[in-house]
Amino acid sequence: MSDEGMIMNNPARKERLSLVSISRHGGLAALAVLLIFNILITPNFLHAQTLAVNVSQVATIALVAVGMTLVIATGGIDLSVGAVMALSGAMAPIIFTSDLAQSYPVLGLGAAFVLPLIAALCCGIFNGALVAILGVQPIIATLIFFISGRGVAQVLTNGNLQTFSNPSFSFIGTARLFGIPVQGWLVIVIAAAIWYVVRYCASGRYLLAVGGNERAARMSGVPVTRVKIMAYATCSVLAGISGLIVVAINSASDAARIGNLMELDAIAAAVVGGAVLSGGRAPIWGAILGAVVIQLVKYTLLANGVADEVALIAKAGIIVAAVYAQQMRKG
Amino acid sequence: MANAEMFDLRGLMGRHAQMSGVWVALAAMIIFGLLRYDNFGSAYNLGSFLNYNSMFIIISLGMCFVIMTGGIDLSVGYVAAFTSIVAAYLSPWGIVPALIGGVAAGVAFGAVNAILIVPMRLPPFIATLSTMLAAKGGSLVISGNQTVAVDWDSNFTKLGMDKAFGPIPWTIVLVAIAAVILWVVLERTPLGRTVLAVGGSEEASGLMGLKVTRAKVFVYLLSGGCAGLAGVFLASGFGAGQPLEGTGWELTAIASVVVGGTLLTGGLGSIPATVGGALLLGLVFNLLNFENGRGTISLSAYWQMVIRGGVLFAVILLQARMSKSAERAK
Amino acid sequence: MQQLVSMRQVRKSFAGVPALRDASLEIAPGEVHALIGQNGAGKSTLIKCLTGVHQRDGGQVMMAGSDFHADSPRDAQNSGIATIYQELNLVPLRSVTENIVMGAEPKNRLGLIDWSAAHRRATEMLSRFGIDIDVRQRLGLYPAAIQQLVAIARAVSLDAQLVIMDEPTSSLDDREIETLFSVVRNLRAEGISVLYVSHFLDELFRICDRVTVMRDGCTVAVRDIAQTDKLGLIADMLGRDRNEIAASGMTALDGPRGEVGPEILSLKDVSTGRALRKASLTVRKGEIVGLGGLLGSGRTETARAIFGLDGLTGGAISLPGGRGAPRSPADAIGAGIGFLAEDRKAEGIVPDMSVRENLTLALLPKLRRAGGIDTHREREIVDHYIAALGIKLASADQPIRQLSGGNQQKVLLARWLATRPDLLILDEPTRGVDVGAKREIQAIIRDFVADGGAVLLISSEFEEIVEGADRVVVMQEGRSVAELPGEGLTESALIAAIAHVPDEVMA
Amino acid sequence: DLPKLEQKDRYKVGFSQMESNNPWRIAETKSFKDTAESCNWDLIATDAAGSAAKQVADVDSMIAQGIDVLFLPPREEKPLIPAVKKAKAAGIPTFLVDRSVDPNSAKPGEDFVAFLGSDFVKQGQRAAEWLIENFDGDKGVIVELEGTTGSSPANDRKKGFDDRILQDDRFEIVASQSGDFARDLGRQVMETLLQAHPDVNVVYAHNDEMAIGAIQALELAGRKPGEDITIVSIDGTRDALQAIIDGKMGVTVESSPFFGPLACEVMNRYAAGEEIEPWVQVEDRIFTAENAADHIDEAY
Ligand SMILES: Nc1ncnc2c1ncn2[C@@H]1O[C@H](COP(=O)(O)OP(=O)(O)OP(=O)(O)O)[C@@H](O)[C@H]1O
Ligand SMILES: Nc1ncnc2c1ncn2[C@@H]1O[C@H](COP(=O)(O)OP(=O)(O)OP(=O)(O)O)[C@@H](O)[C@H]1O
Ligand SMILES: [Mg+2]
Ligand SMILES: [Mg+2]
């Protein structure tokens, strides 16, 4: 996965800013095709409720894809996001259905949001520390939680499905603001904040430097270890938030299922959005775009009654096409 | 040069530390098992353990070659599921057509990977992720969403169910032969050395005039073929082509390769250590089953997941420490 | 006589930016032909167009009288062109033997690689360069000089008609260069042509027959080496008048100095492991301290120790204000130290980031404003240094990898100057930089010192040390063994000190 | 020629669970563990994490440990046949639980003692029959939420329902998509299908989890499950019974996971030398608004 620029006659790229926008075009093209196809074919596509449904479904992928983009920018990858979702999603109901929370509902509700995210943060720090301090390769470092994180969640819940009815908690999954599900707004706010940091703050610069040339970054005083840990930690916290959203929508928490296969969707979204697995680039809005593309593919196939097995093949083809289109544009 | 001798020592320690972690851990686990559990060392357990894990060893071997070039192949699990169906359909004609057909189907998937990765230059992670989805969809399509029975009357199931000698099953014999061949290819042929060189630096290999493209195509075809063989074992050993099998195999294979001390960034790798890694990970399951059988603590399925993650963590820590102390020994 | 290689009017652009406009090159059989030019003149590109790494946009290439076109480096290699590219094209993770024999491995009767024959061949090849090392070890474990020689040994072993060497000597010491030259002379004696790229013009007069000079992607002169001199070549390269050049000295390091001030760095018996065992030195404000030594004598290790990259296993480093050894580069930067690393590609540039971002990378902590980066000030600083250092680029937002080596080096120098350090450690600051840029970089260093900065200068070019340093600390085998005053130091005195075998080391 | 089971005080019993990723399986495992106490079992429980191949390996390791009896819910019809045969060869009587194996290759009374369980096809049929009886509209527009693609309960429950319901002209299945037996996916699939087919008025889910997910999707979309849409499902979980009580769901066909006591009883009969019927049928109840409240406390 090295930069093979020297061998493959690689014409100079334009400056990075326009490069980001160009590489988005693969995803944009895919989006355009999907929209046109749906408007023409899918029944009732142009409908406010369609938008709401898609926004509510894409929110979790988008959040995790944003986090994944940060990790990928350091040249890493995070397979543990689904497991972290399960962990935080399993914790929340345990907390607000506990006796203590029953007696102090506000405190309990607050704790149900905060404690799972702290747990997710710890997972992220663990991943980051393995990668940055011990030098374990990211796939393997995050494989540890991929395997065991969900197990921990199931141990916590004894494997049981936890169902509950808690309208104030379910707010983050079911409420709407201006007709759009509240988690959609949440995604936009979080993405905007992260985009700002990546674009305008020193830590963003550091992130790209670490991914672009780790040794050079270290030599320039960049706190490489901290930057990497921060990337994994942010990714895990965002996964944690997604886990809470899933649980809130369903009014139920099933540790075995929350976030299943999320890592693959998130990685695909990040890459369709223009992230490069070797690091050094962090297209945040690209990740959102990628997530929207993945979501629309899913929606299109489902709404048109394409059988699950065929849908898998179609999804594979679309990912290949979108990423290949980007590759072409980059030259 | 004055410093030559110094390099000797450091290199030797460093080179073996990464690979020896797996043997230490494996030996420790076997001794633990023998001491703690009755029947752990029984011929029956040995035979069935090897038979089941032959599938994982073979895909780990293919994965090892892919990883040595700095690539990755996520499609192996579902490709094996796909080829198990192909083999099941071919089983009435006997063992040879089913074997060849299954492996060929795997190689075909490998060819798709190779096309996506080499001429189309997609990142291996994304390319093989897509083939993984396609292979899963494809196996459901060709099987009509059902498991496909093999022909029990042809000799096909002998491959996966009979023993070659003593408790040693045929599958592991085939795997051993494959491992030896691959070992020779890696250590003693230009192709094998090119695979390693490409993983060390693709750019430099190209400038050195090595056949980079051929090496990259080869590893994906090989990995596909190995997955194909695993699929044949699956069909033959379990009597059916199984569209739902194969989930997570790719991660098991990657973990085996890494536990065997191969760098995911490519350029280094060992065939025996990869086999050791696959055996080690398989042994975790086997030991857990025996532990459950003692009845003192009955571990739930979730604890087993936690423990597997913990074992992986421990092996990684062990490796990190061993290569550190080898470094310090300078 | 028919030329072995003849390239005419070769053109090549990268994304519309021309790297070669009108490049020509003729190499006769059995000659040693030099190719020179400033950084970015297009030398490497011309070579890559010949060897199939790049495909030319236009022009004609002939080899041995017929049209020639290589699709890939392999193609060129098969046609008898062996190349040592400027960026080391070896695989550090693989053994020395493999790096030498790869692509032409000795085989046994079964068609399998015969490793003992391969090791023998590798050992034998290297012994022609006076190297005796364990060829079974990973190449990456050996220092840059040995790696460079391995690359050369590989090229020479390939049985070629033409051996191309793109800056082979940039990381070799004198003794190794001598060996290389004798190998080049042997090649010539066997009738093999050599194309030789170097920024060290003195070398050319010793081994080359003819020289082609490039400037801005064009071939501007072809001369018989016997009929020209160094000044003439520099004039060709720069496109300037020779008298004008003659008026200034050989390096630009000499010049007015400020007052030498208080001590700002002192090392006492510092060791970090086997490569650095006992180094002591001091640096004061306003002076350049040279660090002399052979390759592998521990100079870079000393710099790394000062910069907080390697933990100390013994001895002490003290900085002003009672500060001890920095614990990390960030710590060192905070203490007013800058470190220009010797390996520009691996430890210097972040290739995909813009020149601007590369330039301010070490400065970011000081550019913070209200949670963000003060982009206005950032641009001011960047513009200032681009102008002050004469960095040639299209735009500050251009990725740094598009710049030529010399300009990249200036950007990295600017990265450190911008942090306004008290002490600048420069590890081979002018390696692989052309004469023009070299002088400019030297002038920048001089100005920095004149303003009261202190410099610890590591350089394999004795000229630089001799002319530039106020004091020279000599290193051998990881120890500092002598200190020479800069005043009145001659090159031969320095060489004598470096090569002298001290008794304590023998013990 | 079946292996005999001698009468002992304590038995070493193997239970090879196929996976533990849904409440039903968890309840089943728990039922066996609870029974172990009362039935004097030393229980070895393994978990194959959804892999038929691993399940065979698990059975192998239990055979190696010398179990007396094997209870096996086979992950797949065909791939578990080797496990059944190996157990027989090792002299271990095997009882299949909740799913069976391919009767062409392994037969009760020959290769294994008996199959304890219900019939997935019939479960689907009964759901269809309830719908045919209780649907009072003119046109039933059905969305079907399938289980895990390719799994045998999904295939059978689909077959049973589809074959029966299509005999009645009033009904049409406009969409049939997989929700993977999971609540979250059931909800997402329902949300999407509801957009494409707004006129749907019946939802048939292959399990209760997906049915609950569908109810959530309908409510989020402002529909009234139970009033303008009839929900039909299988399993009989506590949440489903509650939904029936709340009037949101029409029916759920029971598919009980509590096999422990039955297993104990059948095993003891076999040890006593009794002839065991090849298929020990489990009487599946059917929960509707009439009886849901009476059974909710015993549901899982
Ligand atoms: N792959 C590439 N993509 C874009 N521009 C390139 C590429 N390779 C070279 N260039 C540009 O082409 C010009 C010529 O570069 P080249 O490397 O040939 O110079 P050179 O004479 O070898 O310099 P140096 O002495 O520094 O090695 C430079 O401006 C360089 O930036
Ligand atoms: N990556 C490495 N692995 C092992 N030994 C190394 C490595 N890098 C350097 N060394 C050894 O450390 C010692 C000091 O090297 P160092 O690079 O400091 O020398 P130097 O005088 O700076 O030479 P140079 O001019 O090449 O930079 C040498 O013996 C060298 O061979
Ligand atoms: Mg060059
Ligand atoms: Mg050095």
Image (cartoon, rainbow, N blue to C red):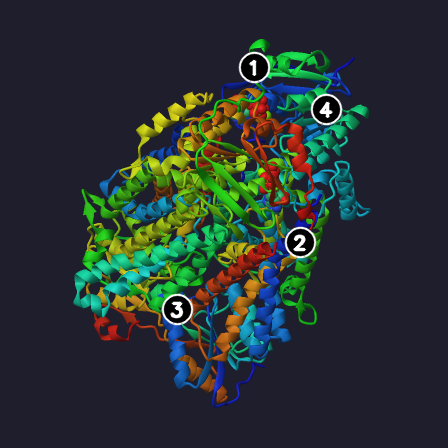
Q: CA distance from mark 3 to mark 4?
A: 76 Å
Amino acid of disc 4: Val
Residue B328 lies left or right of residue C222; in this view the side is: left
Examine the rendering and report whether any part of residue D84 can be seen: no
| Residue B15 vs residue C149, the one in the foreground | C149
Q: Chain of mark 3?
A: D
Residue displayed at 56% across by 32% down: C428
Residue displayed at 31% across by 32% down: C374
Q: Badge 4 is on which residue?
A: C194
Q: Badge 1 is on which residue?
A: C238
Q: Badge 2 is on which residue?
A: B9
* The N terminus of chain C: image quadrant: top right
**Which of the two discs, 4 and 1, labels the residue nearer the N terminus?**
4
Q: Badge 3 is on which residue?
A: D25
| Residue C456 vs residue C190, the one in the foreground | C456
The answer to whether the residues at label 2 and label 1 have Cβ atoms under 8 Å apart is no
Helix, strand or loop status at disc 4: strand
Amino acid of disc 2: Leu
Whether labels 2 and 3 belong to a single chain: the reply is: no
Q: Chain of mark 2?
A: B
Whether labels 3 and 4 belong to a single chain: the reply is: no
Question: Is the residue at mark 2 in contact range of ligand 2, meaning its CB lies under 8 Å from it?
Answer: no
Residue D264 appears at what percent x and percent y?
Answer: 42, 82
Mark in front: 2 vs 4: 2
Whether labels 2 and 4 belong to a single chain: the reply is: no
Question: Is the residue at mark 3 in contact range of ligand 2, meaning its CB lies under 8 Å from it?
Answer: no
